[in-house]
Amino acid sequence: MYAFRTGLCLCMMTSLSMFAQERDSSYLLKGVEIKSLKKSNVRTDYMPEIFPANSLQSQFGDIYIRNTGFGQSSTISLRGMGAQNITLLWNELPINSPSQGLYDLNQIPSFLTQSLNFDIDNNRLTTAGSFSLSHPNRNENYLAISSTAYLSSLYSHKLEGNAKLGKGNISINQQYIYGVNNFEYLNAVGERKRMDNNGQAQSNTQVSISYPLAKNWEIQSGIWYLHTNRDNPGTQTFPSKANLRDNNLRTFVGIKNAHLTVKIAYYNEKRDYFPNDGFSATSTFETQSFRGFVHYHTQLADKFKLDYKLYPSRYVMNSTNYKQEEIIHEASQQINLAFSPSENWTIDGGIKSVTHSYFANLFLPFLSATYKASEKLSVQLIGDMNQRNPNADELFYNIVDPFFSYTGNRNLEPEMNYQLRNVWRYEHKGSQDKIRLNVEPYMLISNDNIKDTFSADFSFGQPINISKVRNYGIQTHLEWLRTLKSNQFFRTIVSFNYIDSKDGDGRYLTYVPSLKSILTLEYIHPNYEIQMTNNYTSQRYINGNNTMRLNPYFLTNIKGTYKQSLKRNQINWSLGIDNLWNENYQEINGFSMPLRNYYVSVTAIIK
């Protein structure tokens, strides 16, 4: 069946001339411009405008989104590593929660995903990589107003604007999402139902300012305010309901020049959880974070480059699930030296150190060697050690009642991660065809891996260190851009990831697919664009004994956009279908995912 559907997709693409393009070209009315073939450049702008988790699931072959439902909490798993080993950066500053060590993807506004970049992980903040979020840099005056509506009664209204501020820029972005999101799904006995208790109200506001100073310096500042009021539906096996509210304020200020960047930030994040199961208590969590970032890089000599990064942090945490206020000081710094003995060779090595209120490691080495065989082909070998410190919940969590007990473990050891990667890159830039191919076999070994354990009757739980987790795999990514006529292009993206991920007892890790493949087909025209993405994800085990698993699934999403020019202005009309084949699937056991659903959107760009 999956083979038939894939073949049918290809036939449809031949007849429909599918297309899409990065937002900068169509959004700013500069004609079609294919800027790069970088794997890290994600095109979520021609995917659904409301929540990015489902879009990202269809964009990358090497990540798996642990999605508990459309608009609900969603985190990333990459190459067998959990979300705590992936850093989200906002304007170069980490935004992962110090309590859980992760970030909910569905709290990222869609205007930030326009410039989303992914790196595995030469900045070495965490073992599995980092996602970088920043405002698009558009040096012009414009205003964009857009609305998106799902037929499941979910809506989004968005405003984006940029204005020249003398020699600088000020950018203002606002997105408001609301609705009941009553999508259709199949329950455990195959009955067609509509989701209830799935209300969504989310307001995301950001302001970003940059202004040049004397002597090539620039000042930057930004503020991000998020308010979320979300009803969490029960699962198919546990029909309790809950309400979750988030109020988060993040702000930063910094200066930079060609060699030095210095930023300081203040975050205030508050979460209130109101269960409706008759026995669980309301819980609150509030943290104040003071974070910094220092980056210095320079050319020491003709063949040497120096790169230094420092990330200091201070967290003050109060929670009903902690016995007392907890304060953590943490700092990560790394220094790298790149040596290029010839035009074909580059050797890059460095050391990372981590200091923490409870842990410290002053020697985490990194070494890579890159050989450029020709203008088109290069080979890189990368090895490093990294450390994940336990997050605050793993250390301090405390719930003890007559029926259930879960406590943190202050005797935990940090996870020690060892990584080896071999990256082969081929790139062809012809006048008619541009091709980019990455092939990357990899190995990840984690000692003292942190895992939650529960008693036989699930009445008691606590995180512990287990002996070892090892992940072997190979990731391939092919991107082919074909020029058909002037300002008309056809793009094909194929991504394939195979992974063998097991613990020390030889059991497969939960929620790690052994195979995931992405096929994206796009046709790009100055006046209209269509995109189709196809995502195959293999079975996933849902328990540590490997006796239960989720079925594989194949999803197809399609979206078309027509661009209507009105002198210097533009209106974009879009229609999309998610889950074209009406697939019944789950990404986390018990959490229903939508069957086929539709959305429409309109965007007006005024210049």
Image (cartoon, helix red, strand yellow):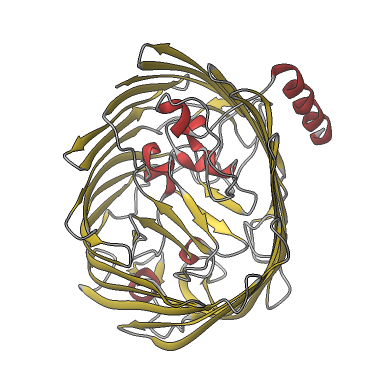
Residue 276 position (above or below residue 121) = above
Q: How many labels does the image show?
A: 0
- Residue at horizontal 62 percent and vertical 62 percent from the top: 79
Residue 501 visible in image: no
Query: Left or right: where does residue 485 sit relative to residue 57?
Result: right
Residue 391 position (above or below residue 428) = below
Query: Left or right: where does residue 547 sit relative to residue 113?
Result: right
Quadrant (top left/top right/bottom left/bottom right) for the N terminus: top right
Give whichever of 128, 371 is nearer the camera.
371
Residue 376 x %, y %: 71, 55
Residue 282 x %, y %: 27, 53
Residue 21 position (above or below residue 478) = above
Residue 183 x %, y %: 50, 27
Q: In which quarter of the image is residue 57?
A: top right
Residue 111 x %, y %: 37, 37
Quadrant (top left/top right/bottom left/bottom right) for the C terminus: top left
Residue 152 visible in image: yes
